C-alpha cells in the first residue's frame, strides 16, 4: 500500500504508545471505522473522555490517517498479511497490529460494499431538452428584458442505474460558449480515436 507522507506520519503517530495508550488507540481505530461505515456517525466520537488528553490537531490528523489507511486497504482488497506488513513498517507493535487487523477483518465486507456503492464511472448524458424564457423583471422588480435558456440534461449513472436530471439556466453567450466547448471536445475525441 502506498499512502501519502502526511497519512504515513499520522499512522506512525497512531503507533506511538506515548501518544496513544492502548485504550485511546482502540477508541480512535473504532471511531475511524464508524465514521466510514455509519452515515449517522457523529464527531462526538472524538470527544470521548479518554481522548481528551490528546491534542485535537493530532487526534484529527491520526483519525484522518487511520480512515485513509482503512479505505486504501479496502480499495486494494489487501489481506491480513499485507496489512500487517504495512503496519509493521509504520512501527506498530504486535498487539496494535492484531487489533487493527481484527477490526479490519470484522468490517471488511461492509467496507467493500461501501466502496462498491460509490461507483467507478461518471454519469452519461442520454438526452438534452431546453426551453427559451424571456425575463421581464428580477425578483427585486428591476426591468430586465432578456432571454434565458433553461437546459435540462438527462443523465444515466451506470453504476447505480439511476436517471437523475441536471438543470441549469444560462444566457445566450453562456449557451454558445457551452456549445463551442462541446464541439471542441467532440473534435478532440474524434482525433484521438483516429490515431
Image: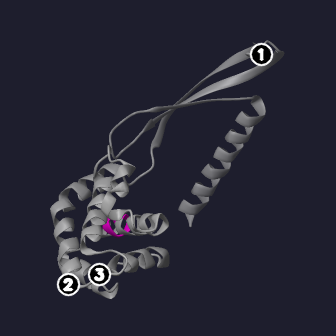
> Real-space Cα distance between discs 2 and 1?
67 Å
User: 17 or 53, which is in the foreground?
Assistant: 53
- Secondary structure beneath disc 3? helix
Q: Is residue 177 left or right of residue 86?
A: right
Q: Position of residue 79 (x, y in %)?
A: 20, 75
Within 10 angstroms of label 3, few (less than 14), some, or many (20 or more) residues?
Answer: many
Q: Is residue 76 above or below residue 178?
A: below
Q: Position of residue 67 (x, y in %)?
A: 36, 64
Q: Quadrant of residue 39?
A: top left
Q: Residue at x 27, y 63 (%)?
A: 27
Q: Quadrant of residue 66?
A: bottom left
Viewport quadrant of the C terminus: bottom right
Residue linked to disc 2: 94
Residue linked to disc 1: 140
> Real-space Cα distance between discs 2 and 3?
9 Å
> Real-space Cα distance between discs 1 and 3?
61 Å
Q: Is residue 70 magenta?
A: yes
Q: Is residue 184 above or below residue 100?
A: above
Q: Residue at x 25, y 58 (%)?
A: 111
The earlier-in-sequence mark between 2 and 1 is 2
Q: Is residue 128 left or right of residue 113?
A: right
Q: Which residues are magenta?
A: 67-71
The earlier-in-sequence mark between 1 and 3 is 3
Asked if marks 1 and 3 touch (Cβ < 8 Å), the reply is: no
Q: Position of residue 167 (x, y in %)?
A: 56, 29
- Secondary structure beneath disc 2? helix
Q: Nearer the viewer, mark 2 or mark 3?
A: 2
Asked if marks 2 and 3 touch (Cβ < 8 Å), the reply is: no
Q: Is residue 65 left or right of residue 109?
A: right
Residue linked to disc 3: 87
Amino acid at each position: 500500500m502506498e499512502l501519502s507522507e502526511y497519512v504515513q506520519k499520522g499512522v506512525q503517530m497512531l503507533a506511538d504508545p506515548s501518544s496513544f495508550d492502548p485504550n485511546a488507540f482502540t477508541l480512535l481505530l473504532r471511531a475511524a471505522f464508524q465514521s466510514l461505515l455509519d452515515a449517522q456517525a457523529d464527531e462526538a466520537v472524538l470527544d470521548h473522555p479518554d481522548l481528551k488528553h490528546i491534542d485535537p490537531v493530532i487526534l484529527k490528523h491520526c483519525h484522518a490517517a487511520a480512515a485513509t489507511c482503512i479505505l486504501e486497504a479496502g480499495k486494494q482488497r489487501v489481506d491480513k498479511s499485507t496489512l500487517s506488513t504495512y503496519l509493521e513498517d509504520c512501527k506498530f507493535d504486535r498487539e496494535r497490529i492484531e487489533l487493527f487487523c481484527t477490526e479490519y477483518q470484522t468490517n471488511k465486507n461492509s467496507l467493500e460494499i461501501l466502496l462498491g456503492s460509490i461507483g467507478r464511472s461518471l454519469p452519461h448524458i442520454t438526452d438534452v431538452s431546453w426551453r427559451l424564457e424571456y425575463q421581464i423583471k428580477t425578483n427585486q422588480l428591476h426591468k430586465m428584458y432578456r432571454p434565458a435558456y433553461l437546459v435540462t440534461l438527462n443523465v444515466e449513472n451506470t453504476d447505480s442505474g439511476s436517471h437523475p436530471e441536471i438543470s441549469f439556466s444560462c444566457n445566450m453567450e453562456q449557451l454558445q460558449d457551452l456549445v463551442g466547448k462541446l464541439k471542441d471536445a467532440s473534435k478532440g475525441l474524434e482525433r484521438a480515436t483516429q490515431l
